[in-house]
Image (cartoon, rainbow, N blue to C red):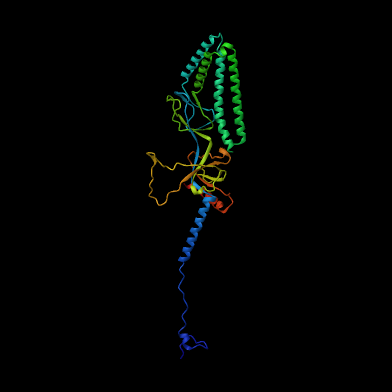
Amino acid sequence: MTDKSEPPVPPGEPADAAANPAPKDVSPPRNPTGLIALGVVLLLLGLTIVYALSDRLAPASSRGIASAHVAQIAPRVSGEVINVLVPDDAVVQAGDALFTLDARPFELAVRQAEASLASATQGVDASSASLVAAQAAVTQARTNLDTVRADADRTFRLEDRGIVAKAQGENARARVKDAEARLQTAEANLASARAQLGPKGADNPSILAAAAQLERAQYDLASTTVRAPHYGVVTNVTLTAGQFIGAGNPAMTFIDAGAAWITVDLRENQLQAVAAGDPVHLLFDAVPGQIFDGRVQSVAWGINPGRTAQGGLVVNQPSNRWFEPARRIPVRIELNGGMEARPPQVRVGGKVHAVIFTAGTGNPIALLARGLQWARSWTSYLH
């Protein structure tokens, strides 16, 4: 009787072939470690190439700082503070009064100078009233011209660098010409008043000395009101009424709001292709989600490496590091469109991320840098 559990033997094959089937060819699985290692090496090599190219085509740094001219406002004369006219962090225009000093001693000095001039003119039988008035007008016109010129010079510098519009420069020139014309008119009136003294009085040494003393006293009196040199912000105001301030001693801090820039520190090997005029994209931590356009103004010519000297010789600086850290050189960057384009949230000393495009903004490296900065602009909401 045939066992039904055994399969039938196909015709043409031996009977033991069905009982003992041939073993299958099973090869051991391939080890993927080599492929993974090769992929990692190629990835690292690619990243190294991209890193090296980015340092030359799109150098970037997050070590940017919002900078501006900072000046210490000091009075020209000494005196007791009578009134502080601006609060802390106030925005002021050119010529705005900041604080006043006690004018009484200077008013007395003016009266004394007027009396000296009147005494000198009595010797030539002339009146000093017109001379005093003309001299006061000259002092006022000269003080106004100094203020207008200081503000205009700053505008001219910004105009030469393309930061402010030509119209602002023309307005500044018009203001200077108007102030110069006023001074010329006042000086002409003064010359006329001197001519009225006659030939003996016009060149009288005593009268000339008294007139110069009067002009100095009037100038000191005008200096008791300290004014803003130009458009800016007054900060760190600790001045108070009753405080005595010496001539030339800082009284408050003034930030020039119309001449701000960005300082970015780049490694030396990032500066190989950086030149003035290169386009820059700027990201301010104070304004996340927005990218601003700028341009390179200049690259610093030197830094202080911290070397010291003792006994006339340079002191050795031993180092226990395997690799000396890279030196960083400051690069000065300005916003396109001038200070009108500066976001009001940005403060002096604020952090800035900058990408400089040394070969334009259309190459692959530049596109990659722009994409990374765009992503960074949104992540800056979180820190």
Quarter residue 156 falls in: top right
**217 in relation to 351, above or below:** above
Residue drawn at (56%, 20%) of the image: 138
When the figure is inspected, residue 148 is found, relative to residue 323, above or below; the finding is above
Residue at image coords 59%, 28% = 176
Where residue 214 sits: x, y (%)?
Answer: 51, 17
Residue 5 seen from this side: no
- Residue at the image position 61 percent from the left and 30 percent from the top: 173
Of all residues shown, which one is farthest toward the front?
312
As rendered, which of 195 and 10 lies closer to the eye? 195
Residue 154 seen by the camera: yes
| Relative to 368, residue 170 above or below | above
Query: Residue farthest to the bottom?
Result: 1
How far from the left and from the top, in percent, is residue 82?
46, 23
Q: From the top left corner, tell me how far across and down residue 177 is, in percent.
A: 61, 27
Of 315 and 210, nearer the camera is: 315
Residue 172 coordinates in the image, percent (x, y): 59, 31
Q: Nearer the viewer, residue 124 or 230?
A: 124
Q: Residue at x 54, y 11 (%)?
A: 121
Q: How many marks?
A: 0
